[in-house]
Amino acid sequence: MKSKINFNRGKQVVVTTAVVFFSGVYSIKAQEVAKPKDTTSAKQIDEVVIVGSRSGGRSKADSPVPVDVFNLKGLQESLPQTNINQILNSIAPSFTSTIQTNADGTDHLDPAQLRGLGPDQTLVLINGKRRHTSALINVNGTPGRGTVGTDLNAIPAFALNRIEVLRDGASAQYGSDAIAGVLNLQLKRDTGKLTGQFNYGGYLTPTANDHTGNYDGQQFQVDLNYGNKIGSKGGFYNLTWSSQFREPTRRAGTESDPIYNAYNAIEKRAAENGVNLSSYFSNIGQLKGSAGEQDFVNLIHQYAQDVSYFGGDLQSKIQSANSISALQSVLNPSSFTKDQLNYFTDQELAYRGLTRKDFNMQVGQSKLNSHQIFANVEVPISDDWKVYTFGGYSTRNGSSGGFFRRPSQSRTFTGLYLDGYLPQINTSIQDVSFSAGVRGKFDGWNIDLSNTFGQNSFDYTIKNTSNTSLRFASPSSFKAGGLAFLQNTVNLEFNKSFDVFKGLNLAFGLEQRHENFKINSGEEASYTAYDVNGNPQTLTSVNPTDFFGNALPGGSQVFAGFRNENKTDKSRNSYAAYADAEFNFTDWLLVDAALRYENYADFGSTFNYKLASRIKLTDQLNFRFAGSTGFRAPSIHQIYYNTTSTLFVNGELKEVGTFSNESQIAKGFGIPSLKQETSKSVSAGFAYKIPTLNLNITADAYYIKIDNRIVLTDQFSRPTDKQIEANPNLQAVRNELDRASVNAAQFFANSIDTETKGLDVVVSHNYRTGDFKLNNDFAINLTKTQKVGDIHASDLLRNAGLENVYFSEKSRIYLEDSVPKVKASLSHNLSWKDFNFYLRNTYYGKVWGADILDANFDGITLPNEHQLISDKIITDLSIGYNINKNFNLTIGVNNLFDIYPTKNLPFSSNNDQFVYSRSTSQFGQNGRYVFSKLSVTF
């Protein structure tokens, strides 16, 4: 299937409405007027925050809620990070995101979390307008499991002037998803100049190239930005182009498990003599008792003698076995110890001229190429009215490795792959967004009418793989289908300031949002298991096996394609009305109140409120308080997503089906339909300025209670006969699992309630004298999320003893302990004449691995025993030099001292492949990154 943006008939009304609206915006009659004030200047932007207030902005210190402001234009010359996720992870302690590995599509889209909550509990705005989320839902064992976040990496960081981070619940103001807070990305408005950056770097570390050293993960990125005026009345356009070319890193250890068995060795000797043993049978059972059985047995006898390292006893047993069944018994891997199988492996590797590292997985960052273009345009059409539009297009192609298919495994057809293979998951991610509107004044009211459209698509192509059940007829590449998400938001907003008390601002608005989620099926061979005649398997068909009689699985190995049964095309609409009032009762007391009513077509309505205040005790000291209710609608992805995946579960690979919450399997387990998450939050803090010291201090404590939190359950195994005997309803569940060819199932469910407590402290200092400028910033985030109350399991699940599968111990770790509870940063930025020096230390607190294991080596594994991954400090350093007014050269290092996370214990290492945990989020596992950056301005 080609990667493309699809518009089905169900969306034509939305698209047509948008087109008419955009056309109407530009057909408003222009008038001859005196030159108005220009758009908001960069200086004003530095002083005023927009997010969290509808009064047109206020100073950061005077805001009744905590807002961080990061000026990317000033930071990007010094930082090694080049995308939004990684920039924020390094400079914002309340924000966490790391590059994932061996997690299917999640490798190409880094989940991001704010204040310890989920990726889907943070709302993202661009220029104050709601951004659409990704099409991808994270179903693998990584932080943010079960959530749908916003693809921040689809937006070029070079297009941004700054990022505002509202660290407070804001559902009453902005709607669903704003439980943890809001990110507002402000696009550049620069005119009259061309700027660019050329960035090259890579990982210089002894662990590069699977711990053999040298250099890997090279990255080259080019960014260009140009803006100019439109007319003479303050209009402008600003364009950004960004391209990134990223090579993979390799951080696997050395494969320590057996790779070859005795039959593989015989098979190799036969192949060297032009005999492919797999061509003698499709199902080994059909060969037994046939006229060809003895010929096949004779071939085994013949070529076994060429394996020089088989001992005399084994050779004797092979030659004495005169039937296939007897040979299966002699050669079966279960007839040997692990040490014996590893001896066979080492001898066979030497014979074939290979090493164990040739069978390593690709662990580390994925390969990625991306291209992005973004635009920001504004045109005044009168003294009081202007039209605006912004948006962009992004295409990203990624490639990551799965689990190596070893020749000793039945999932590998050795008739084609004598040495196994490493399958590759290739993704094509396309993202398009377009917002347009008109804003102005009428009778003292500020009016803003806008339409914002966005779509994200995520298509899979699986390469260097096989449908094992097709044997010799299998292709090596499969179109596996994909996901697409569309969102269109129409918003009309009014606000007006009144000369009441010391100032009153009233705002109200209406919003309509349309969402559509699609699952597109892959080609048939990407998900189908075939019989020996090449037809789809049935309950009575004869199916392919390996020599030992193990079934050869169907579908593309590593990632089975989306099936026709998975095809989904679902839409929903929501409607909202909201009001907001800001009262300046006195010079020292500000009160902000917000109300929002929202109705969703698929689960009903919700009403939320927020009350916030700021008390100015002195010109330098403010106290602020806020309390609110909030909600997060279950994403349309979570309601309708369904597929089959190969997951690494408790040290084993399993075929796991993710089934829709509305499926018969879900109902068979007594799992109810999804409903919205609801929240209550309070916060209190202060902002203190000491002008004589050029020092600013803020501190904010918060508490967030979330009810009916949606999580992805653990894997429900295929019901056993004993379970069915106790509960006959489970027979239908088992039949459905068998029909889907999976041995486990998982679902999205409102499983638990949680509470989050935290504290944010930010201290900023600056010093100026002559050519010397120094900025010092310290920030720390302390946060703790935990489950409270009982698991919301059905009586059926409780009676079957499955309550702890509904919300498992692993799920608890992903929720509570996979992200640092303490994160702090201390940065210094020194400018002297044409030189700039940047130094930052970031502290990442301890986390816990998700696997349940004997972490203290006492021989007892407790049900909540996990490996501790200790805290670390990462140091970044860069030095910049202004060559002249047009050129700046910066060189630097991220992770100067080449710090790595705590190494995995053997149980979690997948045979020494995962040296470091992939189920936690601290700072990644790639090590020291060195870079150079040339910045140009014309």
Image: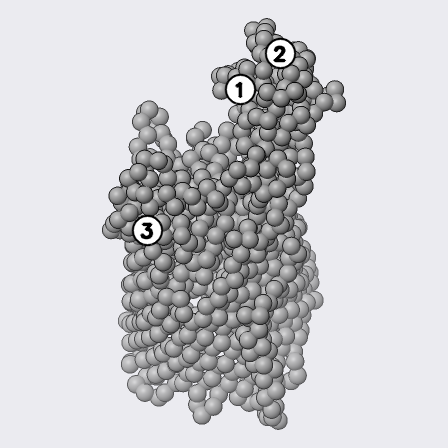
Q: In terms of image quadrants, where is residue 354? A: top right
* Residue that extends furthest to the right in the rendered view of this protein: 274
Q: Quadrant of the N terminus?
A: bottom right
Task: Report which quarter residue 798 is drawn in.
Answer: top left
Q: Residue at x 33, y 46 (%)?
A: 729
Q: Is residue 523 left or right of residue 645?
A: right
Mark 2 vs mark 3: in front: 3
Task: Return the residue at label 2.
Answer: 309
* Residue at mark 2 to residue at mark 3: CA–CA distance: 56 Å
Residue at disc 1, secondary structure: loop
Residue 22 % position (x, y):
59, 79
- x%, y% of residue 247? 64, 45
Q: Which mark is residue 670?
A: 3
| Total tally of numbered discs in the picture | 3
Element assignment for label 3: loop
User: Can residue 551 be seen in this snapshot?
Assistant: yes
Q: Which residue is mark 1?
A: 332
What's the distance in space between the residues labelled 1 and 3, CA to CA?
A: 42 Å
Q: Which mark is residue 522?
A: none
* Residue drawn at the location 55% of the way across and 53% of the way down: 564
Residue 49 in the image: above or below residue 475: below
Answer few, some or many: residues within 10 Å of disc 1's Cα (few below 14, many 20 plus, some between 14 and 19): some
| Residue 318 image position (x, y, % from top left) | 59, 11
In the image, residue 817 lies at what x, y percent?
36, 45
Kindly identify the residue that appears in the image at 53 percent across and 88 percent down.
384
